[in-house]
Image (tube, grey):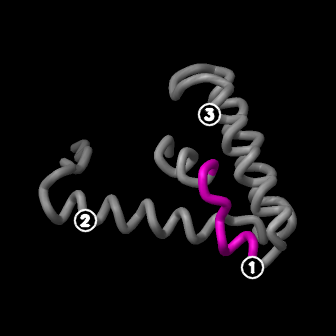
Amino acid sequence: MLAHLQTMCKYPDSLIARKCGPRVAREAAARAGRVLESGKPGDKAYYSALGDLDLWLRADGHRRNPGTTADLIAAGLFVGLRDGVLAPPYRW
């Protein structure tokens, strides 16, 4: 999640831009930045800000769903798992 927020903050999501316009994509990036500024994973303020971002992204019929950055993160995780750089967190 942290890598996704960092990517989304630095590079406004192009799917959001295509569906909602560049202004909304920049707003999503700014909101991701506010989550990062609120604290670190594990902090109550971080999770509160993350929940607010999630609610905002899902509103408006999921039009603000960050598809492009999510795809990039998923691809990176796949390559890391495939190449053995990352170990899956299996829990039995």
Q: Is residue 52 left or right of residue 11?
A: right
Residue visible at 63% across and 28% down in the picture: 46
Q: What whole-number distance in Å separates the C-alpha atoms at marks 1 and 3? A: 25 Å
Query: Range of the magenta residues?
Result: 9-17
Q: Badge 1, how many Cα within 10 Å: few under 14, some, many 20+?
A: few
Q: Is residue 54 above or below residue 82?
A: above
Q: Main secondary structure of the magenta part?
A: helix
Depth check, front residue: 13 or 51: 13
What amino acid is found at the position of numbered circle 3 in the picture? Leu
Between disc 2 and disc 1, whose residue precedes? 1
SS at mark 3 in the image: helix
Depth check, front residue: 88 or 12: 12
The residue pinned by badge 1 equals 18
Residue visible at 68% across and 22% down in the picture: 45
Q: Badge 2, how many Cα within 10 Å: few under 14, some, many 20+?
A: few
Q: Quadrant of residue 11?
A: bottom right
Between disc 3 and disc 2, whose residue precedes? 3
Tell me residue 74's x, y (percent).
41, 64
Q: Badge 3, how many Cα within 10 Å: few under 14, some, many 20+?
A: some
What amino acid is found at the position of numbered circle 2 in the picture? Val
The residue pinned by badge 3 equals 36
The residue pinned by badge 2 equals 79
